[in-house]
Each structure stands twice: as C-alpha cells, then as structure tokens.
Image: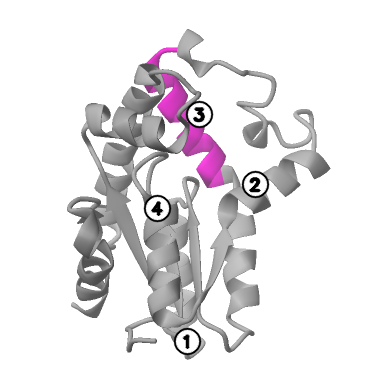
Amino acid sequence: MTESAWDILLLGGASGVGKSRAAAQLARERGAFVVEFDDVVSALQRSTDAGSHPALHHFVGLPDTSVLDVDHVVELQIATAEALAPALLGVVDNRRTVDVPAVIEGDYLDPATVARAVAEGSAGGRRVRAVFLHEGDPARIVANYAAREPDGGRQTHRAQVSARYAERLAEQAARHGLPVVPARPWHEVSTRIERALAG
C-alpha cells in the first residue's frame, strides 16, 4: 500500500475513458475497496419505474442510442447523473462510516454533487477527494471499446457521445474546482491522479 491524499476517492468520467482500469490500479496501490456506481444505477432502475423516476429510465428499453443525436444523448446522460445525486451522496455517506478506503467510480458522477460530497466529507473529518478522468478523442475511445468489448463492433456513435460527455464533465468539474486528469499515458495514470489530488 502507498500513502495517499484520500480515504474516499470519487473517480468520474465518461464511458470508455478507462475509469475502471484506473480505479482497480488505485485500489491495489492503496488497499482500497472499489464501488462501481453503475451497480447502484442498475439497482435503482430495477426498483423504480419510468412513471415515478423518469430521469433514471431514459435509456431503459433503448438498445441502440445511435438513433439519437449525439447532443441529445449527452443531455439525457447529464439529466440522469443529476437525478442520481441523492444516491451518490448516500453511497459516500455509507463509505464514510467504514475504515477501509474506497474508490467510487462511474459515468454518472455529477461534478456538482461530487463537489458537495467532498465538502461534506471534509466537514465530517474524512479525506473525501475527487478527480475526473478525461479522454476527448473519439478515435481513442473507439479503440478502448474494441479492446474491452471485442464482439461489439466499431462503436463510433457511442464514442462520439462519450467524447462530448467527457468535455461537458471536464468543464463542470473545472467550474467546481475539481481536478481533471488526462487518461493517457496509461502507464502512469495512477501517479498523475495522486499528484493532482495532492496538489
């Protein structure tokens, strides 16, 4: 285990930029537990319906988002992330009661909510930190998808959505004073994340 600036790390970013890989590496180095926020999203979608929680169900029953305009998909992603704010704060609240360090990673970490979680954690005496991993090149994201999902075909539209969403997340993160770290080069991503958090 290595020394670090955090007890709870919120690791946000768009799909396909390498969050899961970075989270696993950081967890190994820190002896931390990984919370995949997508699991929480799936649980909430199974326990709610579109009538009561429409913002959680934008993509349910829509197997192919390529039928939608890129900007429209991004707006739906942002609306979903904002609707998940109470759930994210609840996860952080729970992890604050546990001594084991944790990395909470996911696509739907809304920067405004993340900033609030960091402030509340600091007020409660815990080192809650956050960083957003960034990749703005759709071609690189296409390659990442191909490596991760070799049977998925060339996911160009999905990568364009992801790159556009990544830009929006980076803008919002900067607005809230949260560090944004480029995903590449991979071999030193955890070092650069720790450096950004320490700074």
Disc on the earlier residue, 3 or 2: 2
- Residue drawn at x 55%, y 15% is 64
Residue 23, image quadrant: bottom left
Disc on the earlier residue, 1 or 4: 4
C-alpha distance separating marks 4 and 2 = 16 Å
Q: Residues within 10 Å of mark 4 (few under 14, many from 20)?
A: many
- Residue drawn at x 40%, y 21% is 155
- Which residue is label 3 attached to? 76
The C terminus sits in image quarter: bottom left
C-alpha distance separating marks 1 and 4 = 23 Å
Q: Are marks 1 and 4 in contact (CB under 8 Å)?
A: no
- Which residue is label 1 attached to? 126
Disc on the earlier residue, 4 or 3: 4
Q: Is residue 60 above or below residue 64?
A: below
The one of 91 and 153 positioned closer to us in this rendering: 153
In the image, what residue type sits under mark 3?
A: Leu
C-alpha distance separating marks 3 and 1 = 33 Å
In front: mark 4 or mark 3?
Answer: 4
Q: Does the magenta portion include 172? A: no
In the image, what residue type sits under mark 1?
A: Arg
Q: Can residue 180 be seen in the rendering of this structure?
A: yes
Q: Residues within 10 Å of mark 2 (few under 14, many from 20)?
A: many
Q: Residues within 10 Å of mark 1 (few under 14, many from 20)?
A: some
The one of 146 and 131 positioned closer to us in this rendering: 146
- Which residue is label 4 attached to? 19
Q: Are marks 4 and 2 in contact (CB under 8 Å)?
A: no
Q: Which x, y percent locates residue 67?
A: 49, 8
